[in-house]
Amino acid sequence: MPIIRPLYPDEWAIYRELRLRSLADAPDAFYSTLEAESARTAEDWAARLAAAAVSGQDCPLVAELDGQPAGLVWAKMDSVNPALVHLFQMWVAPECRARGVGRGLLDAALAWAREREVRFAELDVTLGNGSALRLYERAGFKPVNAPVPMRAGSALMLQQMRLVMDGVD
């Protein structure tokens, strides 16, 4: 069973490792690129987690399996709409897939949002990533709008999905 916990500012190296692994594993599945993230300094990584720790609006989570980092997700309150949380950077290490890590990360991020009385959770999923799409659908997420291109030059399409947290839309 995975252990899901917050990432703390002094754990920037774990965050960097997972983020870079995720981008290497699925280079077209995220808004950022491996090249851009690899250029960040240790201070950049630490500052990102430090800002999250004091914001009260961010919840970076790490999954650990057998004592090793196994996955990542980041929940962030919407800056305009306090009823909305965005989930992003969701990734599970290939060797840890099908072991409950993704579901554990998703459940923990949604629990954090519910503690803040959030009504809606949104995320983007790359079409073609069937396991992620099924995970989100099982959790109750529904497609919103038509799929859009990932970014210029990418053939991949993104589907925005939304979960109504309180069951009333």
Image (cartoon, helix red, strand yellow):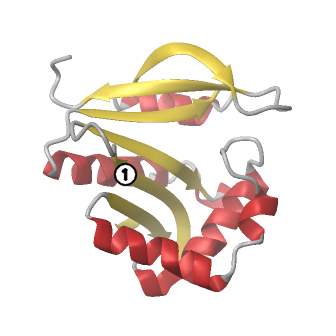
Residue drawn at 50 percent across, 28 percent down = 134
Percent position (x, y) of residue 164? 26, 26
Taking depth in this image into account, of 161 and 129 the one nearest to the observer is 161
63 shown above or below 23: below
Position of 56 with respect to 159 (left or right) is left
The residue at the point 45 percent across, 65 percent down is 63
Is residue 158 at all visible to an observer of this figure?
Answer: yes
Which quadrant holds the N terminus? Answer: bottom left
For disc 1, the marked residue is 76
Q: Is residue 82 above or below residue 44?
A: above
> Foreground residue, 34 or 91?
34
Is any atom of residue 1 visible in this view?
A: no
Given residues 24 and 58, the one toward you in this image is 58
In this view, 32 is above or below 47: above
Q: Picture coordinates of residue 82 (x, y %)?
A: 22, 41
Residue found at the very far bottom of the displayed protein? 10
Q: What percent of the width, then of the height, locates residue 75?
A: 38, 52
Name, please, the residue furthest toward the front: 80
Looking at numbered disc 1 in the image, what kind of residue is underneath it? Lys
Q: In this view, does 98 lie to the left or right of 161?
A: right
Farthest residue, direction right: 153
Residue that appears at 20% across and 33% down = 119
Residue drawn 26% across the image and 64% down it: 56
